[in-house]
Amino acid sequence: MRFWSLYFDFGPYVFLAAAVVLFVRRRLRSTFPFFFASMLFQLAYVTAVAVAYAYALTYPVRLSYMYQWVVTSGLAIQTIFELAVLYEICDHLFLPSIPFWSNLRKLLSWTAAIVLLSASISSALLARVHLTSV
């Protein structure tokens, strides 16, 4: 039972590290730079969270805030990477085969801008609610 728990906790990151190695060996870094950066960031993020968690166990009351900041900022940065990866995949795989590619590219740019703007507005409103409750 413990094997399966460890496998499901660390297995995806072992496969992600293998995917990074394959990306480097096949020279796909320049073709999909945001996807490669997202994979590297995910590995660095998991390492940072593990270190912050281990550090927070030494003095849980004070250091749990640091752990929360690491997790929250990591999730925000990963969300930005995910939007960039979606745009990159659409730009490389779907858009070249579509005849009205330039119009669709503008639509994707505006959609990404609107999603980013709405995310920043909702983040600011949630932070404001949190500050008023303190």
Image: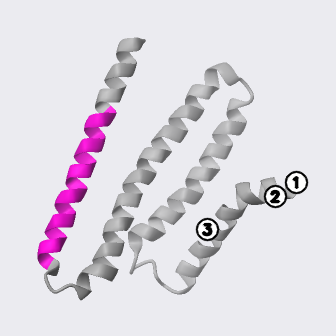
Residue 99 at x, y = what percent?
Answer: 16, 86
Q: What whole-number distance in Å separates the C-alpha atoms at marks 2 and 3?
A: 18 Å
| Mark 1 closeness class: few <14, some 14–19, many ≥20 residues within 10 Å | few
Circle 2 sits in a helix, a strand or a loop, which is it? helix
Q: Mark 3 points at which residue?
A: 16
Q: What residue type is labelled 1?
A: Met
Residue at left 45%, top 77%?
29
Q: Is the magenta stretch mostly helix, strand or loop?
A: helix
Callouts 2 and 3 close, C-beta under 8 Å: no
Callouts 2 and 1 close, C-beta under 8 Å: yes
Q: What stretch is highlighted in magenta?
A: 102-123
Residue at left 49%, top 46%?
74
| 119 in the magenta segment | yes
Q: Mark 2 points at which residue?
A: 4
In front here: 42 or 121? 121
Circle 3 sits in a helix, a strand or a loop, which is it? helix
Residue 19 at x, y = what percent?
Answer: 59, 74
Q: What whole-number distance in Å separates the C-alpha atoms at marks 1 and 3?
A: 23 Å
Residue 80 against residue 32 in the figure, above or below: above
Q: What whole-number distance in Å separates the C-alpha atoms at marks 2 and 1?
A: 5 Å
Q: Which quadrant of the figure contains the C terminus?
A: top left
Residue at left 36%, top 66%?
86
| Mark 2 closeness class: few <14, some 14–19, many ≥20 residues within 10 Å | few
